[in-house]
Amino acid sequence: MQETNVPPSRFRWSALLWFLPAALVLLVVGIWVGRPWWALALWVVIPVGFGVVIGVLGGRRTSAPDDAYAITSQGARSEGRLEVGVPVEQVMRSLREAVEELPRFTLVELSGVEAQLTARMNMKSWGERITLRFHPLEPTRTEIEARCEPRLGTTMVDYGQGAKDLRTLLGAIEQHTARDQHIT
């Protein structure tokens, strides 16, 4: 039996809570204009159904099929990890070089323990905030903990864009650190 570290899915109640006022407004308007009972029921069921579907999709947890960087996603939020055989200072240098090569990303802040990046908007997302935390394991080993969240907090589904961005960014960092290891 294969064991997985992906936490169980959760229902996102906030999605349903966004659609309940719409259902209530449609019910009141339907009663006010004198619609038949079946039309009222349909007017209420449709937004509630959308809320349930988006709540289920926004709360499901998935992991990357290739298990690259242990990326897991819940709705539009993704997390991943990368362990490299270089000190934190070299990781920060590799991060700067990687961001220069990747036009989608902008480095907002960089310190010895954390980096803040943003990703531009595209057809799949309104843009993202990416946080990288650096954990020195040994003097020559560093673990990078990555988290990607949508810029628009109400985003429930990003169609895999956050996981794709983490895979791209962590892959570029891994390439640069590997290249730096061979040079030194």
Image (cartoon, helix red, strand yellow):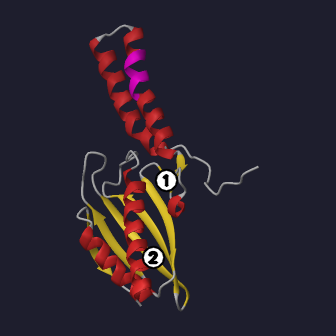
Q: Residue at x 31, y 54 (%)?
A: 152
Residue 81, position as x, y percentages in the image: 51, 68
Residue 34, position as x, y percentages in the image: 31, 10
Task: Please rate how many residues cluster around mark 2, counting C-alpha atoms within 10 Å: few if below 14, some from 14 to 19, many from 20.
Answer: some
- 57 to the left or right of 3: left
Kindly identify which residue carries mark 1: 73
Q: CA distance from mark 2 to mark 1?
A: 18 Å
- 129 to the left or right of 66: left
Kindly identify which residue carries mark 2: 133
Q: Residue at x 25, y 61 (%)?
A: 104
- Residue 181 magenta: no
Give the numbered dot on residue 134.
none
Looking at the image, is mark 2 or mark 1 earlier in the sequence?
Answer: 1
Task: Please rate how many residues cluster around mark 1, counting C-alpha atoms within 10 Å: few if below 14, some from 14 to 19, many from 20.
Answer: many
Q: Nearer the viewer, residue 85 or 129?
A: 85
Q: Residue at x 29, y 17 (%)?
A: 32
- Residue 42 magenta: yes
Amino acid carrying label 1: it is Ser
Magenta extent: 41-47
Residue that sits furthest to the right in the current view? 1
Q: Nearer the viewer, residue 76 or 179?
A: 179
